[in-house]
Amino acid sequence: MWRTRATAACVICRSLANSSYGMKRKSPLQNLHLVSRSIHRPYYPSSKFQRPPLRISIQLFSSLNRLPLRKTKLLNVKYGYQSHRNFWLARLASRLLKLRYLILGSAVGGGYTAKKTYDQWKDMMPDLDEYKWIVPDFIWELDEHIDFEKLIKALPDADDLAKLLPDFDKIGESFTSLKGFFSPGSPGETAFRATDQGYDNDKQYKKVSDKEKIDQLQEELLRTQLKYQRMLERLEKENKELRKLVLQRDDKGIHQRKLKKSLIDMYSEVLDILSDYDASYNTQDHLPRVVVVGDQSAGKTSVLEMIAQARIFPRGSGEMMTRSPVKVTLSEGPHHVALFKDSSREFDLTKEEDLAALRNEIEIRMRNSVKEGCTVSTETISLSVKGPGLQRMVLVDLPGVISTVTSGMAPDTKETIFSISKAYMQNPNAIILCIQDGSVDAERSIVTDLVSQMDPQGKRTIFVLTKVDLAEKNVASPSRIQQIIEGKLFPMKALGYFAVVTGKGNSSESIESIKEYEEEFFQNSKLLKTCMLKAHQVTTKNLSLAVSDCFWKMVRESVEQQADAFKATRFNLETEWKNNYPRLRELDRNELFEKAKNEILDEVISLTQVTPKHWEEILQKTLWERVSTHVIENIYLPAAQTMNSGTFNTTVDIKLKQWTDKQLPNKAVEVAWETLQEEFSRFMTEQKGKEHDDIFDKLKQAVKEESIKRHKWNERAEDSLRVIQHNALEDRSISDKQQWDAAIHFMEETLQSRLKDTESVIEDMVGPDWKKRWLYWIGRTKEQNVRNETKNELEKLIKCNEEHAAYLANDEVTTVRKNLEARGITVDPCLIKDTWHQIYRRYFLKTALNHCNLCRRGFYYYQRHFVDSELECNDIVLFWRIQRMLAITANTLRQQLTNTEVRRLEKNVKEVLEDFAEDNEKKVKLLTGKRVQLAEDLKKVREIQEKLEAFIEALHQEK
């Protein structure tokens, strides 16, 4: 019985020793229990009894990974010897040593020692509540499977154990007697020869367990990396919160000091100026920026949003959303906000309504920048994003590269996108962030070839594989992903290779949920477990840190060289200006516009200095030129055909009333508006001697045209003018001889002008007279000969009847035609009537002029109402009424001009100038020339150089 118990004790101890994880051993007996060791090992009296050192295998865990642990295989117990063999020497030793006492003492002593060690450790252990995140979850679940309280209660007390302990001195003496038994070549060697087979099996299992240990070490390495990654993120989060508090205190003015601009803001200002100065990004602009390129829908915008930690860009399912380059400046700040370069509004990125407004504003700006008939634009949209924990850098998101132009796109869309991408990437200091979709075949990628052309050596390219979760799920061979990451499937080389996950494809996902999903994916991913990817190559957090470090490294290496280049450019431009324009100031486009603006406003003010007399003379003359034809043809001539003065006056009154009600006020307003335009144009285009600068001519002309286009006369002016004109035409009373003579003079001028026009028409009809034919050797055409013969016949008809009516009768037309046919001239009746109209008109005008001479002495008869007089001068009264109406109308229009319309025109000019001042395209179009461009370049280069020097100084101070 006792022999069986002793054997069981040895077996249990050896089993526990073999199943201990990670314990080093030199021989199978080294790890046995204390009691077993006392049996199988000789005793050395010179050495004191020592407790074997406690060996604990410490596994490192991380709450970041939550990786499932491998189940440890229980080692098979190998028996050191067989208990059923009967050896006389073993039986003798067991009796001599009283093994039953040893077994009982070992059990009691081991229990006491375990309880005492447990109590001591429990007291010595610190409070680890704050570090629970380090310990894996399954440790806390052990109490569900093992009842430790029952185990403690089952152990005996310390006093009972002390009574049961044997005399260890006697046991040591017994070990001395067995010294020869365990020595080599002794009979005891034969007793333990049966244990050789068990040891051989133990060595074989050791070889098998080496592979498992390698796997466990790899897992342990991964866990350690992820654990430190988690610790790093936790420290960064605490640092982020602390920096946020410090920035908030500075923002509230707790520290009374003036905050300087951050380095990244200063650098971004330089790039903004360069984007205006050097739109084509030629060799002069070699300042670093991070250029984000990739195929359409490869996840460029999503990567940029993860770096900016906000969903700031418009999204669409499969359609092109990025239609123009978007420059995003990331910087650190107390609040997570975004704002545009040309706007003061801040968008709070922690509020969903502000995020929606920002996405909508970006989409509107993109569509407005695209010209008609195009799909993408080269105009850059500048956006700044500030927030706690953001990496400082400048990124440019470019339109996605496409392989095919689809319906709705401009035919040159593909070429335009290629040219935009090349323009940004050909900058030798630009960092190319190449985005590749991991969920599609690598052979379908277009952007990798383009990047390889721009950066063949890969010295400034960072490769990013997106949608790795879909790639791992769909790709049959995970090693293919490794080949993509390492650049073995592409001819493209790169500084670094990264793999990221930017969400599950749901546009409503938040940044935090995407980050959690990304971390969870990589914790369980085979890519990390099998060491295809390293921990620093995954997650957008690591990508952001790497890109920021590369960006600032490139900035420090190249910024001083670029500052020297702009300094040399400034010297060249200044020398060119001195040689070409030595006496002119260096005025850029905006300064020239302000100068032209002042000149235009001065010229508008000059309109108020025009004298009333000048206004009235111009208005009266222009108005009569506009209405004289109507007065002569439709009022005077029809009324003059009447037989008596009563019918004449009645006809005149009716026609004047109709004319005033329908046409005259509108004509008067048109004349006034045209007169104002002419005077305004005269002041605008009038050269002022040596002070005149022809560089402003196009601008002044455009301002004049736009101002006139916007100006509208007061609509109520016609109603008031109609009443005034009607009252003026109703008056027939001529007060004195001077007004009578003025009316006769006005009538004579009008009739003579009409007679001259009629003579000219008749001459064109009948051809030159005999003097011109002899002097200038000019002949008549066949039609002119016919008309000349017709004219002669019609003149005979008028001589026969001087009081003939204004129209020919049909029988008279027939008579004239027959007389001409008798002389062999065929004439059309319409030609006869047309010729008669001009002949009679000339005859009537000559008669009216003769009547004017007779009426010069008729003022006396007028005062007596032509009583007892054959002279009737009603036509003189008509022209006096017309003349008076013109004078009153001109005076009324002049008052409207000086009091209202000139001021309104001045207001319109100011509005046009303000609109032009905000429209840079207008200014570029209207202010052109070598002088303007040279001054513009010189100003921009000076500004860039000054800002670069300030940036370099701040960069050195930061070092």
Image (tube, helix red, strand yellow):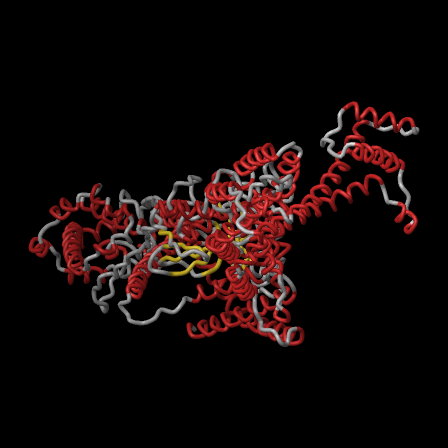
Q: Nearer the viewer, residue 690 or 857?
A: 857
Q: Nearer the viewer, residue 844 or 871?
A: 871
Q: Residue furthest front?
A: 868
923 vs 95, left or right, is right
Q: Nearer the viewer, residue 68 or 483?
A: 483
Indicate whether 246 appears above or below 159.
below
- Image spot of residue 811 (x, y percent): 79, 23
Which image quarter is the C terminus in? bottom left
- Could you tell me if residue 809 is visible in this image? yes
Q: Nearer the viewer, residue 138 or 244?
A: 244
- Image spot of residue 768 (x, y percent): 86, 44
438 vs 417, left or right, is left
Indicate whether 381 appears above or below 872.
below
- Could you tell me if residue 287 is visible in this image? no
- Image spot of residue 525 (x, y percent): 43, 45
Q: Residue at x 14, y 52 (%)?
A: 108
For the image, the number of numbered tags is: 0
Indicate whether 599 appears above or below 730.
below
Which image quarter is the N terminus in? top left
- Image spot of residue 200 (x, y percent): 40, 49
